[in-house]
C-alpha cells in the first residue's frame, strides 16, 4: 500500500460522515482501522462507541488517566479503565474555540506504533468538533426555548393548565403528576466567572443524580440557583418527602466534596397537584431557602416553617416585647453572671426538649443540663415541663434566631 | 433574553425633591392617595425613593389567591387588575408597601415599571424625572459594581423577597457648626 | 399656530422660580393628560420638578374658580355667580365713577407680582397704563437689594451661565439652597462633583443643600460680608490673589487692599461669624488654590439689612481669586434680561392727563401701609392679580386698607385668602390655557408658551381680561382707555421679538420657538476681557449685627421657602401635600430648653405684630438664636415680619424680624 495515498482516502471516507452523527464517525473509524473507537463528552460519558466484530463493546468508563503526549500535537496516550478491563489507547480532546467538547479515543494493538495514528486521530477530533459544536448549538437553542417555558411556568405567567401540558409534551415531561419545586443555591454568589461555573457544575450533578434514579431532569439555572421540578410518582407518595430529603442531602454533599470552601443550600416548596400552581411551590422553596439559612436548617421544607414565617414577618417591636417578657431575665442573668443559659435553651429547643439529644449536642453531662434547667426554671419562676411554657420559650427562641433580637 | 430590570439608587445624590414620586402620578394619573413611588426621609437623615422592587422572589405573587401577578421575562412584576378581587393579601405580604389598595375601585395597583414606556424605548417616568441622577434603571442580570450595596439602613428587610434594587450609600462629609 | 388638536404642545412654566422649565403638554380630546419636560430645553433638559409634574392636577383641581363671582357683603362667604359681562360692567362703572369723583384715575390701582412671569402677563400693567395716570406698585420685594449690589460691582446685572457650573472645580454657595428652590441646578452641581469638584455651602441653616455639601460652614445670619472679607484677607496674605486681574480689570484695588490689611482682623471675623479659624483657613485654601471657582450669592444673603454689603463683599472675593470672568468660574445671582425686551404691555403709553403727568407709585414692599397714606385721592379701587397678599408682611395694614377700599377685584386660580376678602373674583387661566412668551432670570433660555387646552370653565387670561374690560370701559365712556384691544396674543408675541431680540437669540421667526427654546448669545456678556469691576471696601462700617442681638429673649425669625410650594401657589394640590401638617416651627435644642418646650408640642411665636401657632420641631443644628418657620400655610408667618429702618433701595428684609416664643396654652390665646 502506498502510505501517502492512505490518508487522503481515509479522510475522504471519514468526511462523508460529517453530517451523519457521532456513531457513524466511530463506526467509520472502527472499520477503516479495525480498531475500537470511542467518543465521549467532556466528563468522559460515552457518546458513541464502535468495536470491530467479535471484540467486546466498550460501554462504560470508570476512570481515565492521561499519559505521555505524542509529538507536538494534542494527541496523548491514555489509560482507560472499564468495568471489565484496563485499556491503553490514544486519545485527543475535541475542542472548539478553546472549549473542550469531548474526547475521541482509539485502541491500537500493543504491537502497533501509536504515533502513526496521531494525525488521523486529530483529524477525527476536528470532525467530531464540528458535530459536537452543532449539537451544542442545537441544545442551547432548545434550552433557550425550554428556559423561557420554565421561567413562565415558575413565575405563573401561563394561566391555562392546557397550555402547560402542551408545552411540557415538547420535552416529554409528565405534568399530570403532582409537582414540587426544589431550589439549590450557592451562597454569597457573585457575578464572576468562577461562580457561574460552580452553578454549571451544580446543574450537572443534579441532572446526573436524577438520571441515576431514572427521573427525567426538569431543571433551570437562574443566577445563583438551580431550580428542580420534581414529579411525584403515585406509588411513591408516602416516601416522597424522605426521598426529596435524601436527594437534596446527596446533592449538597456531592457539591461539598467537590468545593469544600463554598456553601450550597436548598429549599423545598410544597407539592401541588396542578402545574398552574407550580409558581407557588417555587416561591415557597425560595422562602424556605432563606429561612433555612437563617435558622441553620439543612434541608428546609416550606411546609415545616409555618410559625417561623409568621414570626419572621411580624412587627418587630411586638416580638421584642414578647421576647423580653419571656426570656429577658435569662439574658440578664447570663450577662451578669457570665453564664450560657440562653445557649442551653437554644439547644433544648433545637432538640425539642429531648434531654439526651440536647446534652449530646451541647457536650454537656445530663446532670449539668438538669442543673441548668433548674436554674432557668428558678430565674423564670416557671416549670419547663408545662407544655405552654415550652411553647412560649420555643417561640421566643425562634424570634431571637429569626430576627436577631 | 432574560433580564432582571431594577433600580439603582444613590442616596448621596438624592435631594428628596419628590419629582420622581409626582412624575409617577403624572404618568399614570393615579388617584391622590395611591402612591406607587414614595420618597421618605430615613432616620439617618437621607432620603429613599421606593416603588415596587420587582423582586426576584415576589411575595405579593406567592400569596395572591387569584394569580393576578406575573413576572415578565425582563423581570417586571405586573399585576392584572382584572384578576384582583381586593383581598389585600399582597399588600400585607410585600415588605415595601408597594401594592396600593384603592378603596374606591376596591382593587390593588402598583408600579409596573412603566413597561409601556420601556417597550417604546423610554426610561420609566420616575427615572426620567430625577434631575440629580439619583434614581436609575439597571439590569441586575448584568449589573456589577463593587461600590453598590444591597440595602441601606431604613430600607425594609431584603431577605426572602430579594428586591431588584441596589444602592449607593452616602459619602462622609465635613461640617462646621457654630459652637 | 394655536390650534387645539390632540398632540404635544410646548409650554413654559411661568412661575416665579429659577427653572422657567420647558414643558411638553400631552393633550387628548382637549384635555391635558400629562406633562413631560422638554428635552430641547438646555437648562431643565427634559425634566420638571415635583410641582411641575403636578400640573394636571393644578389645571383640573375642583378647587379652581370656575366663574366670575361677586361676594356681598365682602368677607361674608356669600358668593354669587355672575357673568363676565356683569363683572366688567360693575368694575367699569366703579372706575368711571371714581374718575368723575376725583378727576383722574389715581383712585384706581392694582397690586400684582410674580405669580406668572410671562411677558403677556404684563397685560395688567398695560390695562392700567391705558387709562392714564393711576396708582401702581413699584419695586421687587425679593431681589432688589441684591440687584443694586450687583450694579454697584459690575455696573449692570451680572449672573453667570448656570450650565457652566458643571465644569467648575469648586462651587461655593452663599445662602443658596438649590436642593429646595432650584432642583435643576443640582444636576449641574452633581455633574461637577462627579468630576471631582468640591461643593461648599455657607448658610446659617443646615439646609438640604448643606447636607449634600462636601464642606458645610454654619454662619451667623448677616455676617457673610465679614466672612468674604476674611477669606480675601487670608488669600492676599498668602499671595494667592490674582494680582494681574485686580490691577487691570478692577477699580478700587488699593482701597480694598488697604481695608483688608489694616482695618479688620481675622479674630474679629471668627467672633462675628461664629466660624472657627480652622474652617476659615480651609475655605481660604480652597478659594485660593482651586480654579475655576463658581460663587453663588444666594437670595438668602441679601434678605437682611446687611445684605447689600454682603453681596458686594462676596463679589469682591470672587474677583480677588481671579475667578470672575473665566470659563466655568463666575458669579451667580440672577439676571434681569427681561429688560432687553420691549415689554410692550408693561410700557404701554396711556392717554395724557392735563395736570397729572405720571402714575402714582407705591412701594410694593410695604404696599398696604403706603397705600393707606395716600390722599387726594385716596385709593378706592384695587385690582389684585397673581398675588396672594398673605405672602406679604404687615397684614394689619392690609386689613386697614381693605376697610378703605370701595371695590376689590381679585383675579386668581383658587380662592386664596386674598380672594376671600374681595368683592369680585375673576377666574384666571393657567398657562396651558393661554399664549405667552417666557424669559428666565437664572438661565438664558427664551421659550414660547402655546395654548394647549381650552380654558377651564370660564377662565380667561390676563390679556383677554384686559382686552374685554377696556372695551367695556370705552363702550360706557368712550375714550376712557387706549388699549389696543383688537391685538391678538400672537401679535403681542411677535411684537416682543424685535429684530434686535431675534439677533440676540439667533431666531428667524417666532415659529422657530415652536420647535425648541433658544438660548441667548451670551458670549458678548461674559467676555474675559471685561473691565471696571468695582471692589468693595467696607470702610468704616461697624458690625451692627451683634448690636441688634441686644433684644434679651428674642429670636431671629427666618422663613425659607418650602420645597413643594413657591410661596402659596401650590397649597391646593393634594398630590403634593398629604394630610400631615407641614407647618412646623423649628427651634434649637437650647431655645426649647430655655422655654421649656418639648418636641412636637404646640407653641406660639409672637411679637408686637401678632402671633402664630405651630408645632415645635427641635432642630439640633439650628443656631440658638434662630427660629425657622416655613412660608405660607394657614397661619401666615409673614404677619410677624415688620420692616424697621426703611430705605428705598432694599428688598423686604424677610429675615430681620425678632420674635419670641412660648408654650401654647388655651389660657393665653
Ligand atoms: S416590591 Fe412588593 S409588590 Fe413589588 S415584587 Fe416585591 S413583593 Fe411584590
Ligand atoms: S417605574 Fe413608572 S410606575 Fe414605577 S414608580 Fe417609576 S414612574 Fe411609577
Ligand atoms: S427625583 Fe431623584 S433626587 Fe428627587 S427625590 Fe426622587 S430620587 Fe431623589
Image (cartoon, coloured by chain):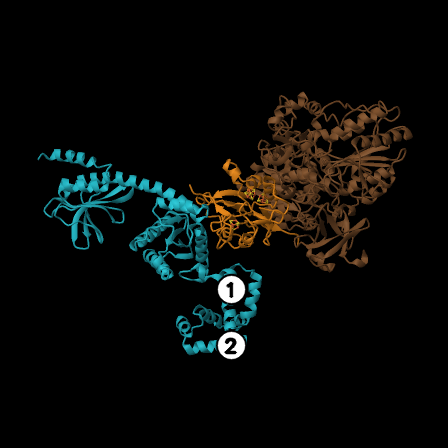
Image colour assigned to chain C: brown
Query: In front: A65, or C136?
Result: A65
- Residue bearing mark 2: A383
Q: Kindly state the secondary structure of the residue where label 1 is placed.
A: helix
Image colour assigned to chain A: cyan
Image colour assigned to chain B: orange
* Residue C167 shown left or right of residue C300 in the figure: left
Res. C186 visible in picture: yes
Residue C503 position by quadrant = top right
Query: In front: A194, or C140?
Result: A194
Number of disc labels: 2
For disc 2, the neighbor class at 10 Å (few under 14, some 14 to 19, many from 20) is some
Residue C415 position by quadrant = top right
Query: Split into 4 quadrants, where in the image is the C terminus of chain C?
Result: bottom right
In space, the residues marked 1 and 2 are separated at their CA atoms by 21 Å
The numbered mark at residue C427 is: none
Residue C529 position, x and y percent, is: 62, 28
Pinpoint the chain carrying mark 2: A
Q: Kindly state the secondary structure of the residue where label 2 is placed.
A: loop
Q: Are marks 1 and 2 on the same chain?
A: yes
The numbered mark at residue A399 is: 1
* Residue A210 shown left or right of residue A366 in the figure: left
The answer to whether residue A380 is above or below residue C25 is below
Amino acid at each position: 500500500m502506498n502510505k501517502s495515498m492512505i490518508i487522503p482516502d481515509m479522510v475522504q471516507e471519514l468526511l462523508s460522515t460529517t453530517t451523519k452523527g457521532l456513531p457513524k464517525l466511530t463506526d467509520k473509524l472502527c472499520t477503516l482501522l479495525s480498531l475500537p473507537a470511542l467518543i465521549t463528552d467532556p466528563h468522559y460519558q460515552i457518546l458513541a462507541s464502535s468495536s470491530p466484530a467479535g471484540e467486546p463493546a466498550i460501554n462504560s468508563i470508570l476512570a481515565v488517566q492521561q499519559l505521555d503526549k505524542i509529538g507536538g500535537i494534542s494527541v496523548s496516550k491514555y489509560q482507560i479503565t472499564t468495568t471489565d478491563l484496563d485499556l491503553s489507547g490514544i486519545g485527543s480532546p475535541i475542542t472548539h474555540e478553546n472549549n473542550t467538547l469531548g474526547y475521541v479515543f482509539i485502541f491500537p494493538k500493543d504491537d502497533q506504533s501509536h504515533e502513526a495514528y496521531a494525525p488521523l486521530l486529530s483529524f477525527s477530533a476536528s470532525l467530531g468538533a464540528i458535530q459536537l459544536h452543532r449539537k451544542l448549538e442545537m441544545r442551547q437553542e432548545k434550552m433557550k426555548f425550554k428556559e423561557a417555558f420554565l421561567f413562565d411556568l415558575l413565575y405563573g405567567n401561563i394561566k391555562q393548565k392546557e397550555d402547560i401540558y402542551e408545552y411540557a409534551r415538547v420535552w416529554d415531561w409528565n405534568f399530570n403528576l403532582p409537582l414540587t419545586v426544589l431550589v439549590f443555591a450557592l451562597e454569597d454568589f457573585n457575578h464572576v466567572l468562577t461562580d457561574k461555573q460552580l452553578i454549571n457544575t451544580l446543574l450537572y450533578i443534579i441532572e446526573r443524580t436524577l438520571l441515576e434514579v431514572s427521573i427525567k431532569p426538569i431543571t433551570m439555572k437562574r443566577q445563583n440557583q438551580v431550580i428542580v421540578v420534581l414529579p411525584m410518582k403515585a406509588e411513591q407518595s408516602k416516601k416522597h418527602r424522605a426521598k426529596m430529603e435524601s436527594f437534596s442531602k446527596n446533592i449538597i454533599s456531592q457539591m461539598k466534596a467537590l468545593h469544600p470552601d463554598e456553601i450550597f443550600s436548598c429549599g423545598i416548596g410544597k407539592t401541588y397537584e396542578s402545574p398552574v400552581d407550580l409558581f407557588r411551590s417555587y416561591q415557597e422553596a425560595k422562602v424556605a431557602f432563606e429561612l433555612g439559612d437563617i435558622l441553620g436548617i439543612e434541608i428546609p421544607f416550606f411546609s415545616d416553617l409555618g410559625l417561623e414565617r409568621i414570626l419572621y414577618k411580624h412587627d418587630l417591636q411586638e416580638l421584642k416585647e414578647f421576647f423580653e417578657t419571656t426570656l429577658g431575665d435569662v439574658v440578664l442573668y447570663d450577662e451578669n453572671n457570665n453564664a450560657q443559659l440562653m445557649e442551653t435553651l437554644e439547644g433544648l429547643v433545637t432538640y425539642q426538649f429531648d434531654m439526651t439529644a440536647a446534652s449530646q449536642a451541647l457536650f454537656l453531662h445530663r446532670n449539668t443540663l438538669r442543673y441548668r434547667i433548674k436554674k432557668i426554671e428558678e430565674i423564670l419562676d416557671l416549670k419547663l415541663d408545662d407544655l405552654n411554657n415550652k411553647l412560649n420559650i420555643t417561640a421566643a427562641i425562634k424570634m431571637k434566631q429569626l430576627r436577631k433580637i | 433574553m432574560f433580564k432582571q430590570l431594577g433600580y439603582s439608587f444613590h442616596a448621596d445624590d438624592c435631594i428628596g425633591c419628590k419629582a420622581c414620586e409626582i412624575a409617577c402620578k403624572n404618568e399614570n394619573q393615579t388617584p391622590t392617595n395611591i402612591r406607587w413611588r414614595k420618597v421618605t426621609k430615613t432616620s439617618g437623615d437621607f432620603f429613599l425613593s421606593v416603588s415596587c422592587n420587582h423582586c426576584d422572589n415576589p411575595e405579593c405573587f406567592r400569596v395572591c389567591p387569584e394569580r393576578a401577578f406575573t413576572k415578565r421575562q425582563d423581570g417586571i412584576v405586573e399585576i392584572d387588575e382584572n384578576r384582583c378581587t381586593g383581598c389585600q393579601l399582597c399588600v400585607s405580604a410585600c415588605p415595601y408597601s408597594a401594592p396600593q389598595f384603592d378603596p374606591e375601585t376596591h382593587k390593588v395597583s402598583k408600579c409596573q415599571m412603566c413597561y409601556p414606556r420601556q417597550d417604546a424605548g423610554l426610561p420609566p417616568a420616575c427615572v426620567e424625572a430625577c434631575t440629580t441622577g439619583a434614581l436609575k434603571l439597571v439590569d441586575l442580570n448584568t449589573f456589577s459594581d463593587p461600590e453598590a450595596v444591597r440595602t441601606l439602613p431604613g430600607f425594609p428587610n431584603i431577605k426572602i423577597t430579594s428586591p431588584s434594587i441596589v444602592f449607593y450609600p452616602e459619602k462622609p462629609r465635613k461640617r462646621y457648626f457654630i459652637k | 399656530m394655536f390650534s387645539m388638536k390632540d398632540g404635544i404642545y410646548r409650554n413654559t412654566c411661568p412661575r416665579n422660580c429659577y427653572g422657567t422649565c420647558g414643558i411638553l403638554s400631552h393633550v387628548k380630546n382637549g384635555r391635558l393628560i400629562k406633562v413631560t419636560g422638554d428635552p430641547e430645553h438646555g437648562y431643565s433638559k427634559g425634566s420638571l420638578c415635583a410641582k411641575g409634574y403636578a400640573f394636571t392636577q393644578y389645571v383640573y383641581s375642583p378647587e379652581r374658580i370656575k366663574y366670575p363671582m361677586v361676594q356681598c357683603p365682602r368677607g361674608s362667604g356669600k358668593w354669587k355667580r355672575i357673568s363676565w359681562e356683569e363683572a366688567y360692567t360693575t368694575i367699569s362703572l366703579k372706575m368711571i365713577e371714581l374718575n368723575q369723583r376725583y378727576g383722574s384715575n389715581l383712585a384706581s390701582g392694582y397690586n400684582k407680582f410674580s405669580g406668572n412671569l410671562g411677558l403677556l402677563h404684563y397685560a395688567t400693567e398695560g390695562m392700567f397704563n391705558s387709562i392714564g395716570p393711576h396708582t401702581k406698585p413699584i419695586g421687587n420685594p425679593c431681589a432688589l437689594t441684591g440687584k443694586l449690589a450687583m450694579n454697584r460691582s459690575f455696573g449692570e446685572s451680572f449672573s453667570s451661565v448656570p450650565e457652566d457650573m458643571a465644569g467648575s472645580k469648586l462651587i461655593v454657595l452663599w445662602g443658596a439652597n438649590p436642593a429646595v428652590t432650584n432642583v435643576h441646578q443640582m444636576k449641574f452641581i452633581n455633574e461637577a462633583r462627579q468630576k471631582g469638584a468640591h461643593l461648599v455651602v455657607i448658610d446659617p441653616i443646615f439646609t438640604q443643600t448643606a447636607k449634600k455639601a462636601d464642606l458645610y460652614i454654619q454662619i451667623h445670619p448677616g455676617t457673610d460680608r465679614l466672612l468674604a472679607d476674611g477669606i480675601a484677607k487670608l488669600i492676599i496674605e498668602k499671595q494667592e490673589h490674582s494680582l494681574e486681574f485686580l490691577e487691570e480689570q478692577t477699580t478700587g484695588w488699593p482701597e480694598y487692599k488697604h481695608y483688608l490689611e489694616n482695618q479688620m482682623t481675622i479674630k474679629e471675623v471668627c467672633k462675628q461669624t461664629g466660624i472657627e479659624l480652622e474652617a476659615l483657613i480651609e475655605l481660604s485654601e480652597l478659594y485660593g488654590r482651586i480654579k475655576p471657582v463658581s460663587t453663588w450669592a444666594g437670595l438668602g444673603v441679601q434678605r437682611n439689612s446687611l445684605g447689600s454689603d454682603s453681596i458686594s463683599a462676596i463679589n469682591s472675593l470672587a474677583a480677588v481669586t481671579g475667578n470672575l470672568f473665566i470659563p466655568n468660574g463666575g458669579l451667580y445671582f440672577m439676571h434681569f434680561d427681561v429688560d432687553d425686551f420691549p415689554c410692550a404691555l408693561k410700557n404701554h403709553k396711556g392717554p395724557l392727563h392735563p395736570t397729572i403727568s405720571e402714575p402714582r407709585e407705591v412701594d410694593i414692599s410695604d404696599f398696604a401701609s403706603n397705600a393707606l397714606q395716600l390722599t387726594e385721592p385716596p385709593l378706592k379701587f384695587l385690582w389684585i392679580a397673581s398675588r396672594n397678599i398673605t405672602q406679604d408682611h404687615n397684614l394689619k395694614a392690609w386689613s386697614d386698607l381693605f376697610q378703605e377700599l370701595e371695590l376689590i377685584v381679585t383675579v386668581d386660580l383658587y380662592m386664596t385668602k386674598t380672594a376671600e376678602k374681595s368683592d369680585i373674583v375673576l377666574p384666571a387661566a393657567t398657562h396651558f390655557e393661554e399664549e405667552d412668551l417666557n424669559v428666565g432670570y437664572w438661565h438664558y433660555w427664551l421659550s414660547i408658551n402655546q395654548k394647549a387646552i381650552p380654558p377651564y370653565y370660564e377662565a380667561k387670561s390676563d390679556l383677554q381680561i384686559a382686552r374685554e374690560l377696556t372695551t367695556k370701559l370705552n363702550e360706557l365712556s368712550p375714550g376712557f382707555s387706549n388699549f389696543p384691544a383688537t391685538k391678538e396674543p400672537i401679535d403681542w408675541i411677535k411684537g416682543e421679538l424685535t429684530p434686535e431680540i431675534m439677533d440676540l437669540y439667533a431666531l428667524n421667526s417666532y415659529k422657530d420657538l415652536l420647535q425648541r427654546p433658544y438660548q441667548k448669545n451670551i458670549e458678548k456678556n461674559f467676555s474675559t476681557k471685561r473691565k471696571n469691576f468695582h471692589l468693595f471696601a467696607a470702610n468704616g462700617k461697624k458690625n451692627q449685627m451683634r448690636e441688634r442681638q441686644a433684644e434679651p429673649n428674642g429670636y431671629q425669625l427666618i422663613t425659607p421657602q418650602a420645597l413643594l410650594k413657591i410661596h402659596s401657589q401650590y397649597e391646593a394640590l393634594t398630590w403634593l401635600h398629604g394630610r400631615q401638617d407641614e407647618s412646623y416651627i423649628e427651634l434649637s435644642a437650647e431655645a426649647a430648653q430655655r422655654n421649656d418646650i418639648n418636641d412636637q408640642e404646640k407653641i406660639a411665636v409672637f411679637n408686637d405684630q401678632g402671633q402664630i401657632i405651630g408645632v415645635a420641631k427641635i432642630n439640633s443644628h439650628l443656631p440658638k438664636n434662630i427660629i425657622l418657620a416655613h412660608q405660607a400655610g394657614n397661619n401666615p408667618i409673614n404677619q410677624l415680619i415688620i420692616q424697621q429702618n426703611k430705605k428705598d433701595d432694599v428688598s423686604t428684609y424677610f429675615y430681620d424680624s425678632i420674635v419670641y416664643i412660648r408654650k401654647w396654652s388655651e389660657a393665653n390665646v
